[in-house]
Amino acid sequence: MASPRPKSPKTPVSKNEGESFWDKIGTIGRKKRIKEVQEVQEEGRHAIDDPGAPNAPEIPPEDYILRDNESRAIIQPQSLNDSSVKELIQTLIDWINDELADERIIVKNIEEDLYDGQVLHKLLEKLTGRKLDVPEVTQSEEGQRQKLQIVLNAVNHTLGFHQKLPKWNVESVHSKNMVAILHLLVSLVRHFRAPVRLPENVYVTVVIAQKNGTILSAQKYQEQLTSQYDDVGMRCERDAFDTLFDCAPDKLAVVKKSLITFVNKHLNKLNFEVNSLNSDFKDGVYLCLLMGLLGGFFVPLYDFHLTPKTVEHMVDNVAFSFELMQDVGLPKPKARPEDIVNMDLKSTLRVLYSLFTKYRNVA
């Protein structure tokens, strides 16, 4: 039996007594000369404390200096003190540290440790199982940005952001924008079905300061970071497989054996054999071939990747097999193609059991 994956030490939530919120995120705003701060201090206070803007957000003087037409988004201090936000941040930190324990990487602060792309680089390689062609270490700011661009391009491709724009980019991540980094990590957790439960319905108050000419304005809004059921990405009704996994492991073993017998009965016709239900179906090849065998039709080999070389190829194969299932009248699987590729056993069993139910009597 394989040894359990090493777990990294949990990093306690830092209290940072005596350190203000703005000290923590001082890197968001560039360090300004004292004289420059004094010159625009009155202008900033007038724009933010104007009587026409009740409950206007408070922004410290060091963040008043903006280039013309530049804007900056900052989380209000009260939001970071919210228990659900603290829980979300700590859960994400612990998840990253567990994933990268073999690399001996320990993240303590999301903003400071992820902005240069180094940790994101290693995390994506671990989650996808493929190497990225980027330098291991970059020292210059330009080198960091170039590496981060490559890493984020790979992330966006993996997450399916082809036309729709993600809520992060090189500039926001490299400038240590907490909101952008949290959105990025939450999306990775959801996509890869990470074995963690994120707190639901987490919101933060974001302040946007913008300068147009000599006028500085600020407004705030509520940004949602997580929704409901973020532990699995969607809510599904419990079924017999949930019960088998939770309460009847002996019966689960019988079901797995029956399904292996069923699929091998047909795959043996092509001289293929399945030994592991979760790993042998992850590339989608057997699912495509099995659908042709069960449905009594030929699946052209050019319609899928017979020797998939990337995760994208595997996802395409599984998605194609799902289309074939619907073509023969089966309901659309509850699982996503990514669930099968990520070797989620419960999802694979649900798909195979659906085939077994329809084709159990096929010779």
Image: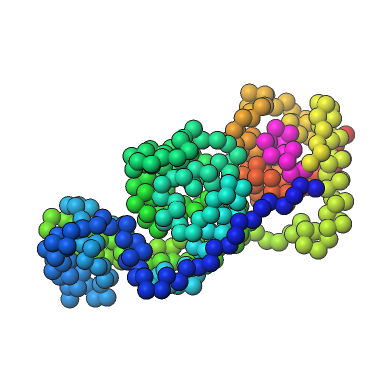
- 301 is higher (above) or lower (below) than 33: above
Instruction: Judge by depth and name the residue closer to the eye, 37 or 53.
Output: 37
Is-magenta flag for residue 58?
no
Q: Is residue 163 visible in this depiction of the protein?
A: no
Q: Residue at x 87, y 51 (%)?
A: 254
Instruction: Judge by depth and name the residue closer to the eye, 149 or 62.
Output: 62
Instruction: Judge by depth and name the residue closer to the eye, 78 or 267.
Output: 78
- 274 is higher (above) or lower (below) than 246: above
Q: Residue at x 64, y 30 (%)?
A: 308
For this view, does 148 lie left or right of residue 31? right
Q: Position of residue 304 (x, y in %)?
A: 64, 29
Residues drawn in magenta: 277-287
Q: Position of residue 357 (x, y in %)?
A: 80, 46
Q: Position of residue 243 (x, y in %)?
A: 78, 61
How many numbered marks does the figure carry? 0
For this view, does 295 lie left or right of residue 126? right
Quarter of the image where the C terminus is located: top right
Instruction: Judge by depth and name the residue closer to the eye, 276 or 135.
Output: 135
Q: Residue at x 20, y 69 (%)?
A: 48
- Residue 307, picture quadrant: top right
Q: Position of residue 33 (x, y in %)?
A: 18, 58
For this view, does 87 lie left or right of residue 44? right
Q: Is residue 26 visible in this depiction of the protein?
A: yes
What type of secondary structure mainly makes up the magenta span? loop
Q: Residue at x 73, y 26 (%)?
A: 298
